[in-house]
Amino acid sequence: MAGITICQSVLERISHSHLDCPICSNRFKHPKLLDCLHSFCTECLEGLRQTHDPDSPTLVCPICRKETRLSKDGVSALGNNFSLMALVEEFNRQEELLRVLRSKVRCQQCDSMEEVVFKCTDCDHFMCLKCKEVHEQLENSENHRLVAISDPSIGKYPIGKTPQRQRSEEVRCKKHGDLFHFYCNTCQVLVCTACTALDHHSPEHDFVEVSSAEESCRKELQDLLCRVKRSKKETQDAMDLTDMALCKLKAAANQVVTEITEAANREVDKVRQREVALKRRVGQIDQDRSAVYDRSFVGYCAQLQHADKTITRVCELLEGCTSLELLAQKQTIQSTLRAAADKYSPPKLDELFFGTFNFQSKEIPQNFGQFVLSKWKLRVEFGAGGDVTTSFQMAQEVSTFADGDILTADADKNKVTVHDPKGQFKCYFDGKTDQSEKCLKVPSSISVNHQDDRLFVVDGPVVKVFNQEQMHLYNFAPSLAGVCCEHEAGLKSVDDSRDTTEKIAEISTARQEALNLNTEPEAGTMGASEPVAAVGSELVAEVGSKATSDVKTEAVTKYIASCLAVADSLVALGVETKKVISLHNLDGSPIRTLPADLVEDNLAINKTKELIFTNYRRSRLVSMDLYGNKVFSVETTHKGKLVKPMGVCCEGHSNIYVAVHLGLGRGEGEIHHYDNEGRKVGHIIQSLYNPLGLALTPRGELVVADKNSVKIFQKVKCNTEISDLTYV
């Protein structure tokens, strides 16, 4: 008896928490679903509508206040919550069972005081042992199912009818009374066989079987769920950045107050009044901007909660509903998910995040202090239209010399041009030499080492190195030795069955012969050995005189570098075909080769010697250290949707700038800003034509190769005197 009491208490708590209508506080009766996925009794919704505005085309949810648009049929046309209906029915059965167990129910067949021990699930009668025997012998009830009171299945559905099956049988065409077997994509409704012949016939209507429609529906809903989850992640990142920016703001404000106080103490008589004014102004800035961060934080919390609730409700609905129920509620669920995905708004933290206090305390000028803000503004654009010889057809790579001159690689023209910082054309950079093999033929990736202004150019299978005066210095190629070591590929060709030791010995011999040669390859020859390139290049050694012509062509094709980055004393070459990054010293000697499955055409190195690269096809931004350990790998997104990343460059150790394509149309390019942990800070430049390559000048300006032109953006600092400071 104690166990029965506990069960009844549990059932009452469950009913009160989950099965009672929020309006009438009674057990749900014919529950209907609103667009916000909240459920209420049909009669309660009718009463709610009559109470407020019977003629209104919308119904406001009393819980979340979201509006649901009603059709001409009103509340009755809203979707039924079949899952909840089945749960209420099952709950009622269990309560009936508990009632029987708690009380001595009299036999409903003979009205005797005999103990009830069986129940006929077909007649829905309780009976004693004697009546049970008689019931089994009667002709009209000999096939009835008799269940013992102690049998747990007494509260469940009849044999052969699971909740989902019974619910499916209840969903029939209101017009023809048949079961639904098809789904009309044109009208977005379930139809029966008669409907397909009368009201939804081809070719005006496109209808498919329920199973096919269910599969398509689930796929669409899963895609929308992914959008919501990505939006949730971006919101979480924005919250983290907001918190970080707020901490930096507080620290900067505290530092300014301290510096102002120290300066004021040194010049007590002169600046005491100014000290008070400065503190008051700094406090106002802190207060104003803190309020902005606080509002952003609250908004992100609300977005996160809404996304969590939506994901939970839709996942529960997808797991518990049948095919017909899912399709019947498809539009409602899609509308809810789209609203949740589009609710996210990207953070606009750039100007606030990079604002800094700048206080000069060495001298005490009239303008005692300044507050510095910055944003990116176009300074100059060149190469668009005009002279055919100086205009760009496909500007895809940019780099800069230490004096500010800008180099641009045009993939269609196979030219590298040099412009001054003002965008004026200076010359073509093609290597001033009479030897054609030392000139540039098909330059692709370019990068400058700012320590000595050496220019590294990927030109076909080799990397050619020049000084600023266009004097050719040496060549080298990606390291094959590292590839073999890292990927256990051995040093065998496809048909070479020799072991690795023999192959290494032969390569060493071939390398030595290549080093001893005094001739260079003919122009356009892909397979010949290159003596200058042999500095640190295992590739050139392998394709030397000991390799066959077939192996030469295959090796050179496989190991052409797809991207290049140079920083301080390090050169990194990405080889997309082999999915590796080859690290070299400045003289071309190999260091090691790292596996990099996602490396493509764009690569950069930050101040902490981490490799940053993008993958256009998979929409990813990846960072790894010099030993192949992943620092981060994140999807590049904008407003919850994947975007395609292209060029990348780094400022210091914490700022990463990425050129992205929002869509396939022109004019949909942007520059996005990420921190050194892969979190998106925001977008700094918008409405670019087709951004491909990025580079930073020594002055901190951002150079963008925008296909038909090159654009230079500079940080415009808004210096405002603290004595007359306003919030920007």
Image: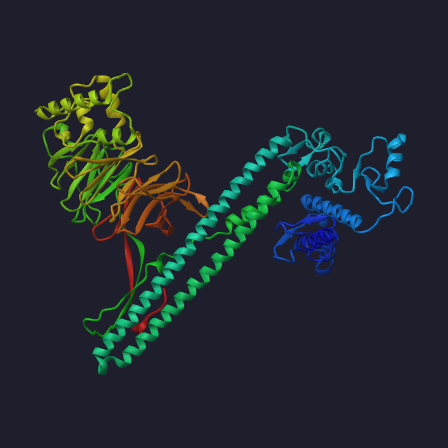
Q: Residue at x 35, y 66 (%)?
A: 250
Residue 469 percent location from the top left of the image: 11, 40
Question: What residue occupies the far bottom of the structure in this picture?
Answer: 269
Which corner quadrant of the image does residue 722 belong to?
Answer: bottom left
Which corner quadrant of the image does residue 562 belong to?
Answer: top left
Q: Nearer the viewer, residue 704 or 166?
A: 166
Exactly how many numbered labels are in the figure? 0
Residue 319 appears in the picture as rendered: yes
Q: Residue at x 13, y 42 (%)?
A: 468
Q: Nearer the viewer, residue 271 or 515?
A: 515
Residue 597 percent location from the top left of the image: 34, 34
Q: Residue at x 57, y 44 (%)?
A: 315
Q: Is residue 40 above or below residue 385?
A: below
**Looking at the image, what colour scheme do you see?**
rainbow
Residue 347 appears in the picture as rendered: no
Residue 128 is left or right of residue 222, and the answer is right
Q: Is residue 346 above or below residue 206?
A: below
Q: Is residue 727 above or below residue 671?
A: below
Residue 455 percent location from the top left of the image: 17, 40
Residue 227 percent location from the top left of the image: 49, 44
Q: Nearer the viewer, residue 622 or 113?
A: 113
Residue 197 is left or right of residue 367, and the answer is right
Image quarter (top left, top right, bottom left or bottom right) of the C terminus:
bottom left
